Amino acid sequence: MTTAAHSQDPNVAHLALRPRKPALVLTPPEPPAERALRLHQEAKSVSLEHLAALLASIDQAHELAQTVVDSGDLYAVGVHALSERLAEDLFRYSRALTALTERQRAPLNAH
């Protein structure tokens, strides 16, 4: 058969027009134990993001309470004292949560 005959052969012509598909590479599925460990590590990592958001909110509430304290007698009776206790408590909570967060972060940094 000549080249002209190949170009007219319907069995060969459709092969030339069909785009080539990339080779399909199959990867073995992740073993369940490895997947569980990976997902657990991801969850631990996301939990640190959650703790960071909580710390930011505590710090913001502390700043607001401290603003009330710094305002003196602008607010009603008892508000100054309550805000002062709240600011002190929030400061302690923030320090404690920061320490606990660092303790949780340490094993993740080791991997």
Image (cartoon, rainbow, N blue to C red):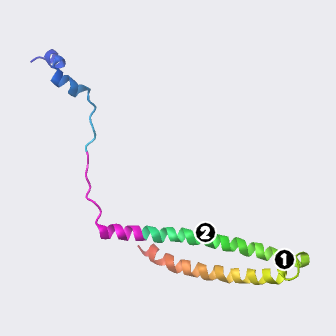
Q: Secondary structure at mark 1?
A: helix
Is residue 88 within the magenta segment?
no
Helix, strand or loop status at disc 2: helix
Q: Quadrant of residue 71?
A: bottom right
Pick the front one: 4 or 30? 30
Q: CA distance from mark 1 to mark 2?
A: 26 Å
**Above or below 5: residue 46:** below
Q: Quadrant of the C terminus?
A: bottom left
Q: Position of residue 66 (x, y in %)?
A: 78, 76
Q: Which residue is mark 1?
A: 70
Which residue is depicted at the point 48% across and 77% down?
106
Q: Which residue sits at x=74%, y=81%?
A: 86
In the rendered view, does 82 fall on the left or right side of 53? right
Q: Which amino acid does the dot numbered 1 rest on? A: Asp
The residue that mark 2 highlights is 53
Task: Report how many numbered discs are placed on residues in the image.
Answer: 2
Give the amino acid at mark 2: Ala
Residue at the extreme left: 1
Q: Position of residue 102 (x, y in %)?
A: 54, 78
Q: Which residues are magenta?
A: 24-40
Q: Any magenta on residue 28?
A: yes
Q: Residue furthest right?
A: 73
Question: For residue 76, what is the image quadrant?
Answer: bottom right
Q: What residue sits 82% from the left and 78% below the top? A: 69
- Occupied quadrant, residue 23: top left
Is residue 90 shown left or right of residue 109?
right
Question: Horizontal placement of 61 versus 49: left or right?
Answer: right
Q: Dot 1: within a 10 Å radius of its alpha carbon, few (fewer than 14), some, or many (20 or more) residues?
A: few
